[in-house]
Image (cartoon, helix red, strand yellow):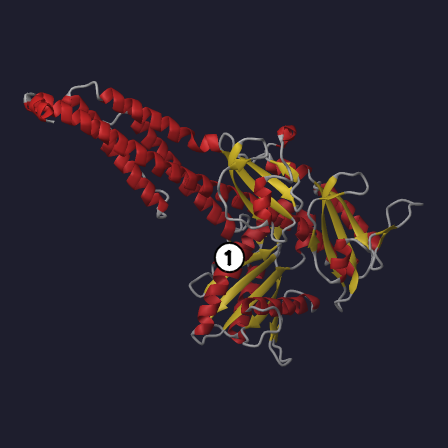
C-alpha cells in the first residue's frame, strides 16, 4: 500500500488527472450503461405493452364497428313493413335489391316463425333451423351475432347475423338472417400489421385462428389452440411476460375479447424487435466509452460530457412520457454537439413520441366520435352523457332525452344513393351542432337515429326544443349542385324519472322511454313529436 501511495504521489498533476478521469470514465460508463440498459429495457417493455394495447383496441373497434354495421343492415330489414306483415315475396325482393349494392353478405334469408327456411327455386325442401342458436335467441326477441362457425352447406367458415321480426304487438314473426364469409374480414386484417414483425390475429372461442393480418403466411403458424396467449385470454390473465408465439418465435402479446366473448383479438410483436434498438444503442455506448479511454483528459472529459447530457435528457424524457405527457420532445439544440449516434437516438425518440401522441389521439377520436357525421357517437353518450346526467340529478335538477329518426331515410338512399344519404346525415348533424353547449350533448345513436341530452330541462321545455329541431329540418333541406332533399324527422321525448321502467340505469330507462315515444311518433304519421309522461299522461305536438 505504501509503495502504491509513493508511486501515485510521484505522478504529475496531468497523469493524476488522466488516472482519475480514466477511472471515472470507466465507472461512469458502467454507472450509465447498466442502469440505462435496465431502465430502457423496462421502458421498451412498457412501450411495447402500450403499443400492443393501442393496436388491439383500435383493431377491435374496427371489427366491432364492422359487426355492428352488418347487424344494423339486417335490423333494417327486420323493421320493414314487408317483414312485419309477412310479405315474404316483397321482402326477398328487398334482399335482392340490397345484394346489388352490398356484396359482403353471402346470403340474406327469412326464417319462418316455425323455424323453417324455404329456399328459392321450386322443388327444394324447406330447411329446419329451429335448433340453431340464432333461432333460439330470436324466439327470445334478441339479436345475435355468432362467432365463426362452419357452414353446413359448403364447409366454409362464416359469421351469422340475425334479428327477430316483431309485429306492432311485439309478437315474434320470424327472423332475418344474414351470412357473411371471412373474405372481407381477411381484407380488413391484411392492413393491420404494425412494426416490422407485429401481427394481429383473430381467434375463435376454441382458440383456433380465424384470420391474421398476414394470413397469406398462415402455413408458417406452428401453434394454435395450445398457444400461451389463448391460455392467458381464457383465464383473463394479466401476465405480460414473453412466450412462444404463433410462428414459433419469442414474442410479447396482448389480447382483447369481443363483447360476447365469441372471439378474441390478439396482437404480437417479437422480442427481438422490442429490444433491437436498445441492444444496438447499448453496444454503441460501450464502444464510445472504450474509445474515450484512449484520449487525453480534455477529450475524455468532452466525450463523457457529450454522452452524459443527452442520456440524462433521454432518461428524464422517458419519465415525462411515462407520466402521461406523450408528445414531449427533447430540444435538439441542447445536444447539437453530442455524438451522432446519440443525436440520432434523440431524433428517433422525438419521432416516436410524436407518433405515440398521434396514435393516442386517433384512438380517442375513433372511440368517442362518429366519423361520418363528425359528432359524438353512442358510446360517448352512454359514458360521458351518463356521467353528466348523474351529476345533474345529484344536484336535484331534471333533464330529458330526445330520440330522433330521419323519416323515410331508406327512401332517400334508394332514390339518391348512399353518398347523398351520408351527406344528409352529415347535414342533420351540422344542424344539431347549433344546439351544442354546456347543457346539451348531441350524438349519433346509430343508422339515421340521433340522440340529444338536455340537462336542466323538463319534458315541456324539451318538447319545445324538439319542435324547434323538427321545424329547422324542414326549413333547411339538404341541397347540393344536383338535388334538394327535403328532411323531416320523428322525435320522442322522455324526462328523467326516479322510478325505472326499463333496464338498471337511468340513462337506459330514459333512452328506452324516448325510443317508445319515437315509435309512437313514427306510427302516428311521422314528422311529429311525442312526449313520454308516466301515468299515461302524454303531450303530443304535431305540425
Q: Residue at x 65, y 59 (%)?
A: 407
- The answer to whether 367 appears left or right of 9 in the picture is right
Evaluate whether residue 194 shows in this view: no
Q: Nearer the viewer, residue 181 or 304?
A: 304
- The answer to whether 279 appears left or right of 243 in the picture is left
Can you name the residue that lies furthest to the front here?
Answer: 2
Question: Where does the N terminus fall, quadrant-wise?
Answer: top left
12 vs 264: above or below: above
Evaluate whether residue 229 shows in this view: yes
Q: Nearer the viewer, residue 24 or 437?
A: 24
Query: Residue 360, image x and y in percent?
Result: 44, 45
Can you name the residue that lies furthest to the top here?
Answer: 294
Q: Residue at x 27, y 31 (%)?
A: 30
Answer with the quarter of the image where residue 304 lies: top left
Q: Nearer the viewer, residue 375 or 411?
A: 375
Question: Where does the C terminus fall, quadrant-wise?
Answer: bottom right
Query: Residue 251, image x and y in percent?
Result: 51, 35
Can you name the residue that lies furthest to the right here?
Answer: 123
Q: Residue at x 76, y 51 (%)?
A: 177
**What residue did someone put label 1 on?**
380
Q: Nearer the viewer, residue 127 or 462?
A: 127
- The answer to whether 331 appears left or right of 127 in the picture is left
How many numbered discs, if any? Answer: 1
Q: Residue at x 52, y 33 (%)?
A: 250
Query: Residue 307, image x and y in percent?
Result: 25, 29
- Within 10 Å of disc 1 (Cα), the crowding (few <14, some 14-19, many 20+) is many
Q: Secondary structure at mark 1?
A: helix
288 vs 347: above or below: above
Query: Residue 65, image x and y in percent?
Result: 60, 48
Amino acid at each position: 500500500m505504501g509503495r502504491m501511495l509513493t508511486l501515485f504521489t510521484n505522478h504529475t498533476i496531468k497523469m493524476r488527472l488522466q488516472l482519475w478521469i480514466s477511472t471515472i470514465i470507466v465507472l461512469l460508463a458502467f454507472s450509465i450503461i447498466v442502469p440505462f440498459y435496465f431502465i430502457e429495457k423496462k421502458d421498451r417493455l412498457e412501450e411495447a405493452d402500450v403499443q400492443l394495447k393501442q393496436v388491439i383496441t383500435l383493431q377491435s373497434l374496427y371489427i366491432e364497428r364492422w359487426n355492428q354495421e352488418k347487424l344494423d343492415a339486417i335490423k333494417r330489414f327486420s323493421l320493414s313493413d314487408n317483414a312485419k306483415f309477412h310479405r315474404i315475396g316483397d321482402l326477398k325482393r328487398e334482399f335482392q335489391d340490397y345484394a346489388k349494392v352490398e356484396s359482403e353478405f353471402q346470403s340474406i334469408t327469412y326464417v319462418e316463425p316455425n323455424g323453417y327456411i324455404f329456399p328459392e327455386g321450386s322443388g327444394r325442401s324447406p330447411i329446419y333451423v329451429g335448433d340453431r342458436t340464432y333461432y333460439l335467441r330470436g324466439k327470445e326477441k334478441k339479436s345475435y351475432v355468432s362467432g365463426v362457425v362452419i357452414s353446413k352447406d359448403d364447409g366454409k367458415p362464416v359469421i351469422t347475423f340475425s334479428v327477430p321480426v316483431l309485429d306492432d304487438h311485439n309478437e315474434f314473426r320470424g327472423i332475418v338472417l344474414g351470412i357473411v364469409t371471412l373474405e372481407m374480414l381477411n381484407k380488413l386484417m391484411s392492413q393491420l400489421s404494425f412494426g416490422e414483425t407485429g401481427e394481429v390475429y383473430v381467434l375463435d372461442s376454441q382458440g383456433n385462428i380465424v384470420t391474421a393480418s398476414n394470413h397469406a403466411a398462415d402455413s408458417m403458424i406452428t401453434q394454435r389452440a395450445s398457444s400461451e396467449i389463448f391460455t392467458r385470454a381464457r383465464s383473463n390473465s394479466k401476465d405480460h411476460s414473453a412466450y412462444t408465439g404463433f410462428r414459433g418465435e419469442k414474442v410479447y402479446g396482448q389480447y382483447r375479447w369481443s363483447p360476447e366473448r365469441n372471439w378474441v383479438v390478439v396482437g404480437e410483436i417479437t422480442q427481438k424487435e422490442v429490444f433491437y434498438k436498445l441492444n444496438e444503442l447499448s453496444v454503441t455506448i460501450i464502444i464510445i466509452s472504450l474509445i474515450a479511454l484512449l484520449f487525453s483528459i480534455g477529450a475524455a472529459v468532452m466525450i463523457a460530457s457529450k454522452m452524459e447530457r443527452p442520456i440524462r435528457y433521454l432518461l428524464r424524457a422517458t419519465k415525462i412520457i411515462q407520466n402521461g405527457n406523450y408528445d414531449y420532445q427533447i430540444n435538439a439544440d441542447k445536444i447539437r454537439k453530442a455524438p451522432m449516434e446519440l443525436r440520432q437516438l434523440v431524433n428517433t425518440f422525438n419521432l416516436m413520441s410524436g407518433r405515440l401522441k398521434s396514435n393516442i389521439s386517433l384512438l380517442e377520436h375513433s372511440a368517442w366520435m362518429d366519423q361520418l357525421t363528425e359528432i359524438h357517437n353512442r358510446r360517448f353518450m352512454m359514458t360521458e352523457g351518463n356521467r353528466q346526467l348523474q351529476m345533474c340529478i345529484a344536484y336535484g335538477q331534471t333533464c330529458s332525452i330526445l330520440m330522433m329518426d330521419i323519416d323515410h331515410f331508406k327512401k332517400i338512399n334508394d332514390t339518391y344513393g348512399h353518398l347523398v344519404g351520408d351527406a344528409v346525415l352529415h347535414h342533420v348533424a351540422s344542424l344539431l351542432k347549433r344546439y351544442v353547449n354546456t347543457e346539451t350533448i348531441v350524438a349519433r345513436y346509430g343508422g339515421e337515429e340521433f340522440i340529444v341530452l338536455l340537462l336542466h330541462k323538463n319534458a315541456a321545455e324539451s318538447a319545445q326544443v324538439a319542435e324547434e329541431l323538427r321545424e329547422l329540418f324542414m326549413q333547411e333541406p339538404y341541397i347540393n349542385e344536383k338535388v334538394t332533399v327535403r328532411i323531416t324527422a320523428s322525435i320522442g321525448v322522455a324526462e328523467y324519472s326516479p322510478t325505472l321502467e326499463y333496464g338498471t340505469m337511468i340513462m337506459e330507462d330514459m333512452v328506452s322511454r324516448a325510443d317508445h315515444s319515437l315509435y309512437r311518433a313514427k306510427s302516428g304519421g311521422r314528422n311529429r313529436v311525442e312526449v313520454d309522461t308516466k301515468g299515461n299522461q302524454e303531450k303530443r305536438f304535431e305540425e
